[in-house]
Amino acid sequence: MKKFINSVDHLLDESLGGFALAHADIIQLNIEPRFVRRALPTRPGKVALISGGGSGHEPLHCGFVGFGMLDAACPGQVFTSPTPDQMLAAAQAVAGDAGVLFIVKNYAGDVMNFEIAAEMLDIPHASLLIHDDVSIPEHQGMGRRGIAGTSIVEKIVGAAAEAGADLAACKALGEKVVHASASMGVALGSCTVPALGKPTFDIGPDEMEMGVGIHGERGRERMRLASANEIVDYLANIIDAELKPVRDQPVLLHVNGFGATPLLELYLIYQVAHQFWSRRGVNITRSLVGNYTTSLDMAGCSITLCLLDEDMTHHWDAPAHTAALRQGC
Amino acid sequence: MKKFINSVDHLLDESLGGFALAHADIIQLNIEPRFVRRALPTRPGKVALISGGGSGHEPLHCGFVGFGMLDAACPGQVFTSPTPDQMLAAAQAVAGDAGVLFIVKNYAGDVMNFEIAAEMLDIPHASLLIHDDVSIPEHQGMGRRGIAGTSIVEKIVGAAAEAGADLAACKALGEKVVHASASMGVALGSCTVPALGKPTFDIGPDEMEMGVGIHGERGRERMRLASANEIVDYLANIIDAELKPVRDQPVLLHVNGFGATPLLELYLIYQVAHQFWSRRGVNITRSLVGNYTTSLDMAGCSITLCLLDEDMTHHWDAPAHTAALRQGC
């Protein structure tokens, strides 16, 4: 296994330590239990937003803690849910009478542990479930996974909370964003989970995996390697069929890298996806291109489309100051 | 070769097209000859800063065009110098009487082509050579290559130009930053140049390459894979011997990913490097961690140390609004 690590056991703490040293102006790290919170005080009466999940998806979620986005994030071990005590301690540290909204990607462990934490909380709370991965049928098993749409939800709801939205309004807005978003990913290679020490699946030099998640799990279909045009066409058609954007619909188009795919290729994918929806008369008014919801060192990317309205656009454009995303401040 | 492309011939134009679509609020793309310039007008009388080089290092340089950094960037084909007509057209488009500073990484083709362009220019001009790679002896062959220190130079000189520094002052400040910076890289894997279709060098599962550049060339030494602590110790000792920071010296510490190394590992490297210099009493006051000067899909990273003074720190902190780096605006 070729990674910059000292030991599998200390990888997460050493990485979080570096994150805290590099961004001491924005975040603080709580060691035991592990959570990252804002370094600067928030406006009194603000709803607290807390997310979390397994590590290995950086900059998600710790990179989104800061003004205009999250109040705290709880990192689990690599691809492993954080524990309820992390979420509880984070909520007790950052939330007040206005309450806390837990932003939870739809994975069994995350859902269960955030639920346990919520039950133990004695302040107002609500949960928002993210399930934007349209590679999975809506009502199969646990349902759809939360993937790259998460960044968009955390940005938009973060801005609303900053602007004074109450707990119910934050949750309702979050659900609107989730409902308006659809994502699907493709992998050219697997990733290597440190504790496993080898790629999570084998894949041939002329194969690709369609509909992958962000934990090195296989996708819904193994296909022969195709051109960028064909790959985008495949993904975008599925996303388009789900959201059915009408002519002149304003949208945000997000091309997300999984960790090992260069920007050179991500921008190429962005152009092809832009052409796909432009041809249909869809109005691409906002964009996000880069590595935001990653899967360790996986080569691949996902495409997310989010149908915008004026309110969502306004919150997308609002100031944010986090390690991974900065806007207007 | 597993990449998101349609054809090797159109890769660059399709990627630049996506970049221009995604960041139309910040930059404009000129198609023939190829250059990227700011979308918004600059202050009259401002010195223009133009950089460029082979593509495959994204976000360098096009991602640094915008308020507070570059006025234009000229992308060559992958790992290939841009041509003099690109630089000349870019200068004619963005530079006025205050003149233009060409920021050139030290590679034979880049140096030659920027020189040819400079000779054809009829406005005041100067060139700044970046040569921060201390893996190479200073006076060997072409001398030291320009690598990840480039981002720091473009940020600091960009802020000075924005604040009204004249051409001579911009060049002098740039030389101060270059002189105060030292970088060295390590690769765990090679990269695949699209036109070549296979990795530029073979490397075993328990080997690493020390002192690599950013064009898939081999480094100065092949070594057995070591722990992150040992790797940082090796690189940091060479950098430290070059710059000899004294106790309490303020520095900027930059850990740069080459493209396929996750943030999880880059932040771990950052912590180890932070400890290395903190133990020596060096005062790490600024940081930059992420993929800024990449080498396509190479797994690896570089460490850059830059000795700061008040003036440099002030310019580092000044507002910047580019696709890849945003600060205070």
Image (cartoon, coloured by chain):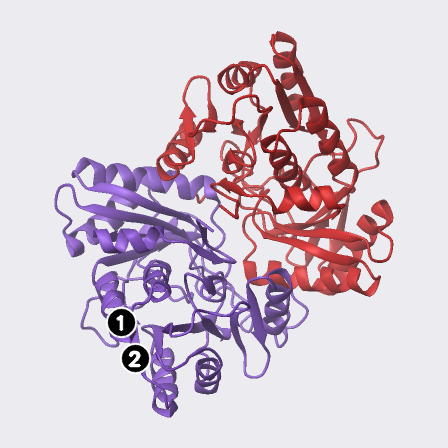
Chain colours: A red, B purple
Crowding at dot 2, Cα within 10 Å, few <14 / some 14-19 / many 20+, comes out as some
Q: What is the chain identity of the residue bearing mark 1?
A: B
Q: Which residue is mark 1?
A: B171
Viewer-proximal residue, B221 or A180?
Answer: A180
Can residue A245 be seen by looking at this rendering? yes
**What kind of element bears circle 2?**
strand
The quadrant holding residue A266 is bottom right
Question: Badges 1 and 2: C-beta atoms under 8 Å apart?
Answer: yes
Q: Total of numbered circles in the picture?
A: 2
| Three-letter amino acid code of the residue under disc 1 | Lys
Question: Which label number is shown at residue B126?
Answer: 2
Vertical order, B101 against A41 (above or below): below
Q: Is residue A261 left or right of residue B276?
A: right
Residue at 34% from the left image edge and 45% from the top image edge: B287
| Percent position of residue A24, x then y | 37, 35
Vertical order, A256 against A266 (above or below): above
